[in-house]
Amino acid sequence: MTLLHNRVDKTVLKKRLKEEDLKRITLSFYRYVIISDPPALRDELFRQWKELDILGRIYIAREGINAQMSVPESNWDIFLVRLNANSCFKNIPLKIAVDGNGKSFYKLAVKLRAKIVADGLKEDAYDVTNVGKHLSAAEFNKAMELPDTLVVDMRNHYESEIGHFEGAITPDADTFRDELPLVADMLKDKKDQKILLYCTGGIRCEKASAYFKHQGFKDVNQLYGGIIEYAHQVKAQGLESKFRGKNFVFDERLGERISEEIISSCHQCGEPCDTHTNCANPDCHLLFIQCESCRIKFDGCCTPECKAVVALPIEEQRRLRKGKNKKDAHAVYKSRLRPNLKNLLNLK
């Protein structure tokens, strides 16, 4: 019987991934479709994909699927055949990663969720199928040049911090559920203007466009396939790229280069940088931007305090973590995702 959950320590899995010589394809896909028995589908997909040595993070809910994964090139054709054999996923659009680095996930996790994108709203709050108009890269570029057009980034602030479209509104939000009402309020007096929405692969815009139409916005549009598909179309068609910087991704890479501009800075020293990392202290794991110089100086940590913890023997680290109140772990920060490290470290 196939074990339906990972039981191997992540340190072992990361080492295994680093050392494997398989060529992998990183991709993502989603579809809003009614799934009659999410638990049964979850188990079926885990068995199939485990057998094909697929790694990734997949969410399944009654409203559909949201998948990010890496597939061995040698099993790519089998993966496609099996995926299309399921009527729910037949001909589902796949977004292949821009940078081609297949070492993006170290384990397979297929999880059940109430929704494939958490919006904080009741299931019947609005019609998620009544979405905006999908635009290609060329159409999106052209629409951006029209007068009174509003371009809205439907990602979190730490994503847009390292890369976004020219002139885009980049809401100061930690989560998608925070962003929906925030943007609706920001644009409440502009409901007759053309709205252009974009996100990483399109899934958040799919919901956002339906939400904004429900809120009375008249001309709602979304970038088909998100930033990932935009980058592919720009390259294939020789279009001008209006996206600046990096595209944040939710896997081990934490970002893929779209343009050469660096539009953000190291959170510790302020030098130009767009490389995200998680603090090397497991009890902190703060997401922040860190340049190579600061990475060496702080051993991949966010503060001298975390650096001191990481330097301790592993048993001592575990002893310190035991019984610690997680709510107090980041009291020195505005939030886990908004580190003011430069001020915290008294750096100029």
Image: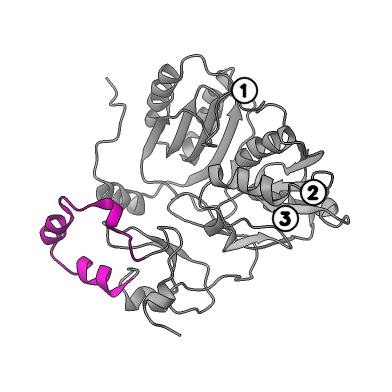
Give the vertical position of 274 relative to 29 (above or below). Answer: below
Whether pointer 3 and pointer 1 mark residues with C-beta atoms closer than 8 Å, the reply is: no
Instruction: Read off the magenta span.
Output: 303-332
| Label 1 environment density (alpha carbons within 10 Å; few <14, some 14–19, many ≥20) | few
Q: Nearer the viewer, residue 140 or 288?
A: 288
Q: Residue at x 37, y 73 (%)?
A: 295
Mark closer to the chain start, 2 or 3: 2
Q: Position of residue 151 (x, y in %)?
A: 74, 53
- Residue 190 numbered tag: 2
Disc on the earlier residue, 3 or 1: 1
Residue position for label 3: 235
Which numbered circle lies on residue 90?
1
Rendered view: 218 above or below 128: below
Quarter of the image with the N terminus is top left
> Under tag 1, what secondary structure?
loop
Chief secondary structure of the magenta portion: helix
Amino acid residing under circle 2: Lys
216 lies above or below 175: above
